[in-house]
Image (cartoon, rainbow, N blue to C red):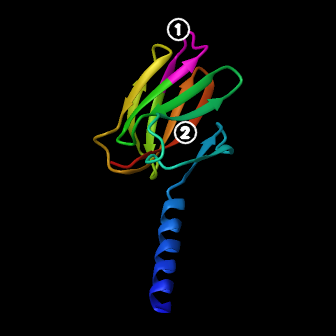
Amino acid sequence: MKHNFFLLLTLLICSASIIIAQNEICYSYDASGNRIKRVLRSSQLAKKEPRLNRMYNDKYNITLSSSSSDGHFAVNIVNYRGGIDSYLNVYNVAGLKIYHKNIFGESTDIDISSSANGVYILEIIIGDTKSQFKITKKQ
């Protein structure tokens, strides 16, 4: 009887640690590569709303959102003014540019679904302002 109790207790502890380990830590970086923000995200199983990551700088409020982690992202830029040379790049962890797109409005979509799963750096350049996000593609 004691053996079954300890077996059940061990199983419960292992299950709880797996559930707790479903959190993710996301970082935001400034133009110099310094980490300026750390966000702890709960498991996507617990909540179905889109994931948001925000970057604030002197001129713009940039929001990166994704309803899943399959490589489709939406970038929204508040206070964006047209006529400024604006674009975004996505780099893999080796520093190779895998995606480039010009920005023409407040909302832009990114599709890196054809790329391999892993961690990428999204760089958004609006005039002389540079912002970077760490993004993860899982599916």
Q: Residue at x 38, y 35 (%)?
A: 99
Which picture quadrant has residue 61? top right
Q: Which residues are magenta?
A: 76-87
Sequence-wise, which precedes: disc 2 or disc 1?
Answer: 1
Query: Residue 86: in sight, yes or no?
Result: yes
- CA–CA distance between discs 2 and 1? 24 Å
Label 2 CA crowd tier, 10 Å (few <14, some 14–19, many 20+): many
Residue 133 image label: 2
Task: Give the secondary structure at mark 1.
Answer: loop
Which picture quadrant has residue 130? top right
Q: In this image, 15 relative to 78: left or right? A: left
Could you tell me the amino acid type at mark 1? Gly
Q: Nearer the viewer, mark 2 or mark 1?
A: 2
Query: Residue 58 at what x, y percent from top left?
Result: 71, 23
- The residue at the far left in this view is 114
Query: Residue 73 at what x, y percent from top left?
Result: 42, 32
Query: Which residue has dot 1 on it?
Result: 83
Could you tell me the amino acid type at mark 2? Phe
Q: Residue at x 57, y 14 (%)?
A: 80
